[in-house]
Image: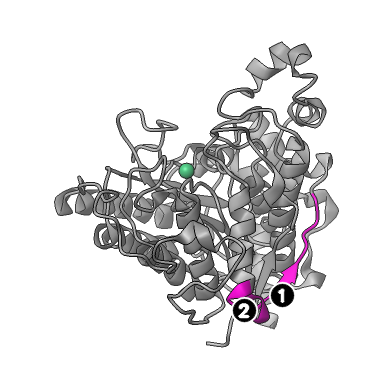
Amino acid sequence: MSKQRVSYFFNPDVGNFHYGTGHPMKPHRLSVINSLVLNYGLHKHMQVYRPYQATVQDMCRFHTDEYIDFLQKVTPQNMSSFTKQLSNYNVGDDCPVFYGLFEFCSMYTGASLEGAMKLNNNDCDIAINWAGGLHHAKKFDASGFCYVNDIVIGILELLKYHPRVLYIDIDVHHGDGVQEAFYVTDRVMTVSFHKYGNNFFPATGDMYEIGAESGRYYSVNVPLKEGIDDASYWQVFKPVISNVMEFYQPTAIVLQCGADSLAGDRLGLFSLSNKGHGECVKFVKSLNVPTLVVGGGGYTLRNVARCWTYETSLLVDEQISNELPYTEYLEYFAPDFTLHPELDAKAKKENCNSKQYLEAITKFVYDNLKMVQNSPSVQMHDAPGPAIPEDAKIKEEDDPDVRISQDLEDKMVEAKNEFYDGDKDNDQEDIKMRE
Ligand SMILES: [Zn+2]
């Protein structure tokens, strides 16, 4: 297997935004990760880009004009004149108005969008945007610290070239915004592993949420109980993703690496170590499918920084020392100053996931995935491979974005409206055969 080419997107200003005093989401973590990545020398093994900033138009590929217009206008000073919108768009508490809010959204969204474009152009095999991964944002409103859903916008871009995109979410929270966006289409399969139960945010993602209409069986949920450790997580992650690959055969992957599934997270309830979390990243990389890697949750800053630095090293295939290099943030990592600290016994919660429970979910998911294979609307004949060459670009009138946003609006997708219909897929096969 030839070495995968990695692109890394980082805007040095993205770490300077503040959600507000006491808010668990701290964009500053992004500066800390970038500093570790540079001081470990990992930038030498990837293409580093200062990313494109998404425009209103880019954001409106998924979100409504009114909502994005509001995000662009609202500021901490004028917010009192937006009372109605604040409540309509769920902005104010969990998703506060802060200085530069729109610019922040435009930075993390632009990076995911550019990552998707680079993958489409075959400029790289893996694109990394730790600032992205804001999986809770909805078409009409903000949710769970997320305003603009960069993942959905990235996937819409990938769909211009890719017949099937797989979304994998290992954040402790359910990837509800992405699931909802693609709930009725078979062009995207969403797979989310998350804590479920006792009203844990966002309280969706039980295993019976499997998609609807053309998307039936294309939403996969793995609801887990609190305290899951590395071994138990692996017991479900590996078979589920292996089965998904076998039955769905995606041509591109988006991996959301929310680090709030690590032990000791300020909001999370799982007990994963850095290595256990990284094992999932390693596995997805080994599938050798063009992949957009994004961040997500992660509320104990030093843990997130260690985790995504380690995962950057895995993605570029470089071993890095357990001893952290000197950075201006070294003090955050006291007292051990290591990449893989011993898990604090106090931070480790009891694992409430029995072997039987995990086996039962894996079996349930497997049985549903078998239905994907039997689904007549899916063409499985083209094998995973690189993005379609430039000359095979889809004609303007077949713009999938337009179709898909329309479909989402109607909450209805019929097979005849699908962008990759049978004929197109045959074209696709011809291209492959000519290569
Ligand atoms: Zn989360």
| Residue at horizontal 30 percent and vertical 29 percent from the top | 198
Name the foreground residue: 421 vs 56. Answer: 56
| Residue at horizontal 44 percent and vertical 60 percent from the top | 334
Q: Is residue 315 left or right of residue 421?
A: left
Residue 240 in view, yes or no: yes
| Residue at horizontal 74 percent and vertical 58 percent from the top | 12
What number is the disc on residue 41?
2
Callout 1, which amino acid? Answer: Gln
Q: Is residue 264 magenta?
A: no
Q: Quadrant of the C terminus?
A: bottom right
Q: Position of residue 71 (x, y in %)?
A: 75, 30
Callout 2, which amino acid? Answer: Gly
Magenta part of the chain: 39-53
Q: Position of residue 394 (x, y in %)?
A: 78, 60
Q: Is residue 351 left or right of residue 219?
A: left
Q: Quadrant of residue 157?
A: bottom right
Give the alpha-carbon distance from disc 1 to disc 2, as whole Å: 12 Å
Residue behind mark 1: 47
